[in-house]
Image (tube, grey):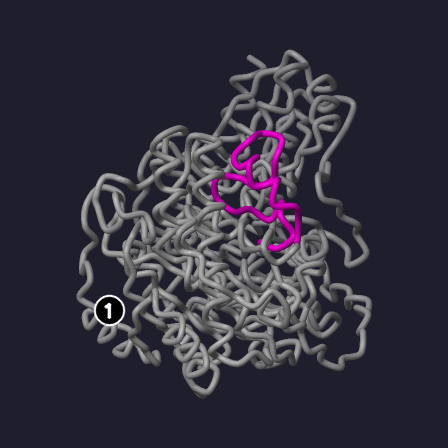
Amino acid sequence: MSIDRASLIPALKNVATRLRIDSLRATSQTGTGHPTSCCSMADITAALFFAEMRFDPKDPRNPDSDRFVLSKGHAAPILYAAWAEAGAFDRAELLKLRDISSDLEGHPTPRLPFVDVATGSLGQGICAAIGSALNARRIGSSYRTYVLLGDGESAEGSVWEAADVATMERLDNLCGITDVNALGQSRATMWQHDMEQFARRWRAFGWHAIVIDGHDLSAILDAFDEARRTKGQPTMILARTLKGKGVSFVEGKQGWHGKAFKKGEELDRALAELEKQFVPVPATGPAANLATQIAKPAPAPRAAVAPKPVTPPAYAKGDQIATREAYGVAIVKLGDADPRVVALDADVKNSTFSEKFEKALPDRFYQNFIAEQAMIGAAMGLAARGAIPFPSTFACFLARASDFIRMAAISHVSIKLAGSHAGVSIGEDGPSQMALEDLAMCRAEPNYTVLYPCDAVSAERLVALAAYHPGPAYIRLSRPKTPVIYSNEEPFTIGGLKVLRESAQDVATVIGAGVTVFEALKAYEQLKASGTSIRVIDLYSVAPVDRAALVSAARATKGRLITVEDHYAAGGIGDAVAEAVADAGFTVHRLAVREIPRSGKPDELLDRFGISAAHIVSAVRAAIS
């Protein structure tokens, strides 16, 4: 920006004052919100949007625009005020804050084109910012990513997971700002205004830390300059601020978190104080309207690369291949075909077979070590910026990042989670390693696709389908080797299923997925030998399910539906089928793991916990007796 500092500072001061006024008015109009949290970061926001970042307010999704993630999402009103000040929309819209008719929600969501990921669940924005910074590297762009955290938020463990990952990746295009206003929701924050406590922690994690007065605009601008010059490591600007800055009767006082100023005397008094803080700025010249001086992004020359066809599976029926191994093959094929595909790992690449991707495409493989929250958050940031990320780990450890999985649903970002080693079929490792609630976790989100392949062919096909299906997806993978039962040409669809055994004499339908498909097929053979015929379904798409096909099977087999799953009874395949057929008048008999399991051999565990072929046979005989 070609404005001298002497002219720029007063202009920015006035912008900061307008942002405070707009935040107060918006929150008072709705009667809810966090105006004092907005006031503490107003000077930082003014400097960031109107003197530092390169972006186009009319084209917020420009791939080369600098990115801003508001990790302390409760300060959403000032984010909206900044974009209105920049000219992205009419300032009058700010008074619709939190109204059901408005996309200016209580915390930011990507309903707004200038919001990449939903924030408000603290500790997540910085993880997403890592993904955004990695994406700049992926596409060869010079855009920078800025993320603003609260000091109370800094107690979140995911913040420090992110700190480690950003240092390992040497993300010098990432700049964090911590708004150290010393007050949390219920009391003073952990370190209050002891700035050295913050600085030494960030330095210990390998960041370049800069301590400033967060209300000194010259110091803020100098810090941004220093961050841009810093190479080989990310920067954290630690800004000492006052909550409620600019309004004397709340400034630095407890008890005002999340409280809007009451319309009337209280709001009028606050606004009157702020109105007096405007300073003279020349009526003409570049400083008169900073919105017109925002630096536009510098486009990086890049050729559009259309995805190539994905190489199909190449297995022979009967081959013994674990679906986790087929997953590793599948993502390499996707990565070869599409430069948007990336893979993330949490130090289990040799178990999930994502190491195949690292060997083939190392520049698009991101190792997060044992930091599942940072991994999912980074995947969210990558997806928001156009990548197709496949983060993978043991399915049970995804539960550690369940809140990130929830926020990915709210963000509607197309992350493609892969969880291996699911269920008691992993064997001797025992219950701490057995994901038995993961289907429930992901099915609970209304926009997640949940897929559960049983063999290598279905695994490859479903991974490819997930890559290009809109929204987040979860792919459940198994540890044991299973035989290939599908031909390489077999088609699959999101929301489909496969009827593997069928006849006009079927007395019941048995529905499995993953490893239990093979238990159902064993049960079929045992029952057939005694003159009893059953229908067997591979429910590879657990969400959505093929309701019509399930109802049809129920009608054809006298309403006898039996589900069998390597999962707890709540929220998995049994519930998915029951929900699908309930309004047609059918009920479901569910075989599932119903107690905390233990170590043992896979076959022993399947039998002991009620989901083996023997238990299926017993359930069928009981149903027809």
Q: Residue at x 39, y 45 (%)?
A: 604
State the residue at coordinates (67%, 53%): 466
Magenta stretch, main secondary structure, is loop
Number of dots carrying numbers: 1
> Which residue: 49% across, 45% down?
22
Residue 520 in percent (x, y) is at 59, 37
Queried whether the magenta region covers residue 141, the answer comes back as no
Image quarter (top left, top right, bottom left or bottom right) of the N terminus: bottom right
Looking at the image, can residue 403 be seen? no
Q: Nearer the viewer, residue 152 or 357?
A: 152
Residue 562: image quadrant is top right
Q: Position of residue 354 (x, y in %)?
A: 54, 69
Above or below, 540 relative to 323: above
Q: Is residue 305 above or below residue 520?
A: below
Of 584 and 84, the residue lying toward us? 84
Q: Which range of residues does the magenta coloring cover?
A: 88-115
Q: Quadrant of the C terminus?
A: top right
Residue type at the position of mark 1: Phe
Q: In the displayed structure, does residue 585 sit left or right of residue 167?
A: right
* Whether residue 75 is situated above or below residue 350 in the rendered picture: above
Residue 167 location, quadrant: bottom left
Depth check: 453 or 398 in front? 398
Residue, disc 1? 198
Q: Is residue 93 magenta?
A: yes
Q: Around disc 1, counting alpha carbons within 10 Å, would you say few (fewer than 14), some (14 to 19), or many (20 or more)?
A: many
Residue 43 appearing in the image: yes
Q: Position of residue 172 (x, y in %)?
A: 47, 81
Residue at 42% x, 83% y is 226
Residue 369 versus residue 101 in the image, above or below: below
